[in-house]
Image (cartoon, helix red, strand yellow):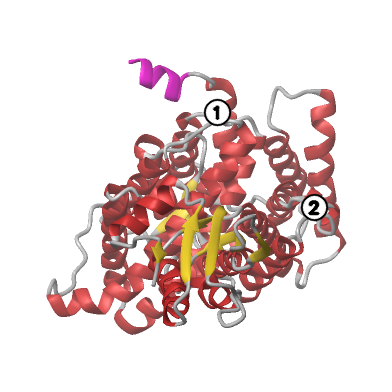
Amino acid sequence: MQYIKRGFFGNVRNDVLSGITVALALIPEAIAFSIMAGVDPMVGLYASFTIAVTISIVGGRPGMISAATGAMASLMGPIIAKYGLDYLFAATILTGLLQWILGIFKVGRFITFVPHSVIIGFVNALAIIIFMAQLPNFIGEFWPMYLMVAGTLAIIYLLPLVTKAIPSALTAIIVITVIAIATGSDVRTVGDMGEIKQALPFFHIPQISWTWETLFILLPYCLALAVVGLTESLLTATIVDEMTETKSNKNREVRGQGIANIITGFFGGMAGCAMIGQTVINVKSGGRTRLSTLVAGLFLLFLILVLGDIVKQIPMAALVGVMFMVCIGTFDWGSIRTLGTIPRGDAIVMVLTVVIVVVTSNLAIGVVSGVILSALNFGWKMASLRCQDHRDEQGRKVYRISGQLFFGTMMHFIELFDHHADPDHIVIDLSASHVWDHSAITAISKVIQKYAGLEKTVSITGLNKESQRMMDQVGFSGSSSH
């Protein structure tokens, strides 16, 4: 009972209003993504309903909105083109199953390996993509469209100065819709995006051949869908954590995304994941708990079944204005100001992440590329060794090594020593270093062997406990003598 009270009834008024706002913004997005995937608009609408309702119960990030998304839709076109709609439903089910399995293995922890520069690049790229996605709505439009967009933005930003009782985005949609209907403005509406059928989703087992051959046909597509969906969902959850200063269960979110997609595949929907745009709308409208996500899904179905004729008359200008607000609120403007002050490597990674995501429109490729670039940048920094040498009171030459010893510094380490010119007794001081892997141990062994071949003695000093333990495991004595 405490879970239900806290999860669904801790912020009722704001959650209901924010959920209604999100539902209105979901409709054109779901229709657009359906068209992108090459399916009937109802496939995207049904998916948005079932995913939102399911994730509100089984997800790990309260207040986050999941539904049909462009990132997933872009990967579904080939399935529809080659195999047909039922294979898309089957792929949705298999994608969910893969995600659920990954959740069981707790892959959510790997979000901690995504550097902050990549997360900022991801956020900024999404803001740019959302902005660019609105531009086609201006094609062929005239000044009434521009006035309505401006009016929407004015209401969104000015109304909170007067009252915060109602989400400004919801107010803007309602006011602009009333104005458009009252004036008979000839502007593009939601109804122009695609046909909205007033019908319930129904249980449907995909009519395909359930064989190993079919599995191997779908598996490559489903793996890509699973990875893209989880990448966007986990990053969005991380962003909401920061926006709301709360924590979330990432592994539960991974399992929840899987369960939501499995159910969606059986109810005529396509695979989806978290939506950063709608999530930002929800959070900025006051949505915080699972109730906001549940209301978004349920009200979306209510709009389809009961208010379909009214929904069709909502001007796209109002929804474009709301999405512009999302772009402005999502983009990390501070990252531009600090671009010249943060480490150059991090700045390059951030910019390249933005460029790759925007150019490819593939979030997973952009994020993975950013992580790889960050790893290379980190490896480059760690691959620098410093060496100071001197003679001690006993006449031995002491090499004091500073830096990390691993596969990336192996060759550099070997080249630090002057084997022939050095005296008969050498000390390698590793008190300012750390031995990380077998490559490092091999490098130390090679140095000792070279000195041993010249009948010189080498002593290793300063090893910390972890380094000593690793060297002991391979039977390394740490010294040589003739």
Q: What residue type is labelled 2?
A: Val
Within 10 angstroms of label 2, few (less than 14), some, or many (20 or more) residues? many
- 314 or 323, which lies in front? 323
Residue 7 inside the magenta-drawn segment: yes
Within 10 angstroms of label 1, few (less than 14), some, or many (20 or more) residues? many
Q: Residue at x 42, y 43 (%)?
A: 250
Let me know if residue 243 appears in the view: yes
Q: What stretch is highlighted in magenta?
A: 1-9
Q: Is residue 268 left or right of residue 394?
A: left
For disc 1, the marked residue is 15
Q: How many labels does the image show?
A: 2
Name the image quarter holding residue 357.
bottom right
Would you say the residues marked 1 and 2 are in contact, meaning their CB atoms lie under 8 Å apart? Answer: no
Name the magenta segment's main secondary structure: helix
Q: In this view, does 363 lie above or below 51?
A: below
For disc 2, the marked residue is 149
Q: Where is residue 188 in the image (x, y as percent from the top left)?
A: 70, 61
Q: Is residue 96 above or below residue 256?
A: below
Residue 349 inside the magenta-drawn segment: no
Name the image quarter holding residue 211.
bottom left
Q: Where is residue 106 in the image (x, y as percent from the top left)?
A: 33, 48
SS at mark 2 in the image = helix
